[in-house]
Image: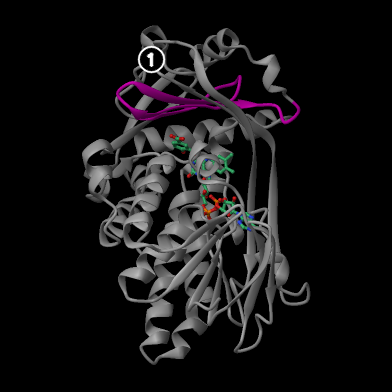
Amino acid sequence: MRTQVCIIGGGPSGLLLARMLHNDGIEAIVLERHDRDHVLARIRAGVLEWSSVETLDRAGVGRRMHAEGTPHGGTYLSAQNRGFRVDYEALTGKRVMVYGQTEVTHDLYDAMDAEGTPVLHGVAGVTIGNPDSDAPFVTFRHQGADRRIDCDWIAGCDGYHGVSRDTIPANVLKTFEKIYPFGWLGVLSETPPVSHELIYANHERGFALCSQRNAMLSRYYLQVALDDQIEAWSDTRFWDELRRRIPEQAADSLVTGPSIEKSIAPLRSFVAEPMRWGRLCLVGDAAHIVPPTGAKGLNLAVGDVHYLHDALTRAYAGDPAAIDRYSETALVRVWKAIRFSWWMTSVLHKFPGQTPFEQRIQEAEINLLEVSDTAKANLAENYVGLPF
Ligand code: FAD
Ligand code: DHB
């Protein structure tokens, strides 16, 4: 088989890149390890920056997002059960869109089906050949047969546990990592959200987040210990603990119900540099991971796709040097989101062994946000998303 761009990974990065390339008449094939139902069952991000919304619009996959998503002009922060609002719209003129990653992925699959872009599911043993030459290729097994795709470019959109990043030689690849000493326990429940906007809560018992997908679907998170087992968290224990950590008014009006999904995720900051080696370009989680506190993971993936799409269309239009700037351009934005997510995580979580000094610094950070419009504007600018 031959194509122009071989895309490894059919998550949001891979699908969006394929869609945008198709719109410009550039051919791509997407190789995905899992079946479609598995990809669509993964409950992940819930907040889109407005630049991501506009990118999805430009890609022609925004119709359902605007019909079913909810724009949010602000959010609540709380410390020790007392909340205050950050008005994103007043401070930046921008909003964010609450629309789940699952739905974004769904819309992208529908678009692929309609246009006929091939997405091969259930591929195994993907390997990348000659990425540092002008004739790269990808080999894999699909439906019992060994296959090979020759291509011009390879997009490594295969997430943190994919194969693309490891193809870059150790003496070229530089990685930066910070592991946080806690995890997030997430619950999805078919209940009305406790607040019409998100609540990010700092509490001495640990961080909590109240989010949502729609009027009858809520998403909540609790900071838990890294060695906590999911079985130890009955629904009742989860709701009781959430009530303790959020503002009193919210706790009083919290509607509880059975969880329909419950999982624990570790928190990590990670960056791999460079994001391009020869004809292989890393995109999204394959190149970087953020702790979820700033809602940046999916948005960073959309940003990378924006830059790579731009570079590839320029390259095909006769400006091959455009691709030379991809890694550097993307990383400048990535590092700012890495900083913001690290900062949100540091300010809002209870760290094991946190000293009284560190506790007071955290309280001062949150108080500064409450009283200072300048501090709020800084948070707001980063949360709604820095420009591409
Ligand atoms: P992925 O979504 O990981 O997609 C990669 C795809 O590649 C997958 O479909 C995978 O099956 C496929 N793949 C992997 N290896 C291979 C291979 N060898 N061959 C073929 N295919 C392969 N972000 C937020 O902003 N908010 C959140 O609340 C949030 N929660 C998250 C919870 C979890 C458990 C995780 C893992 C991530 C979460 N994120 C969140 C981050 C966000 O979901 C990611 O940043 C986003 O999914 C990145 O998209 P991606 O397409 O780059 O990678
Ligand atoms: C969601 C997840 C986040 O990490 C976040 O910061 C905001 C919302 C969510 O899943 O809805």
Query: Is 375 inside the magenta-drawn segment?
Result: no
* Quarter occupied by the N terminus: bottom right
Please say if 114 is above or below 83.
below
Q: Main SS type for the magenta part?
A: strand
Q: Residue at x 38, y 33 (%)?
A: 370
Magenta range is 198-227
Disc 1: which residue: 250
Please say if 58 is above or below 250.
below
Q: Residue furthest bottom?
A: 318
Query: Is 209 inside the magenta-drawn segment?
Result: yes
> Residue 143 appears at what percent x and percent y?
63, 56
Residue 15 placement: quadrant: bottom left
> Residue 56 appears at what percent x and percent y?
31, 56
> Which amino acid type is shown beneath numbered disc 1?
Ala
Local packing at callout 1 (Cα closer than 10 Å; few below 14, some 14-19, many 20+) is some
Residue 135 placement: quadrant: bottom right
- The answer to whether residue 121 is seen in the rendering is yes
> Residue 171 appears at what percent x and percent y?
78, 76
Q: Residue at x 49, y 77 (%)?
A: 3
Seen in the image, is 156 located left or right of residue 90?
A: right
> Residue 274 appears at what percent x and percent y?
62, 73
User: Residue 384 or 160: which is nearer the viewer?
Assistant: 160
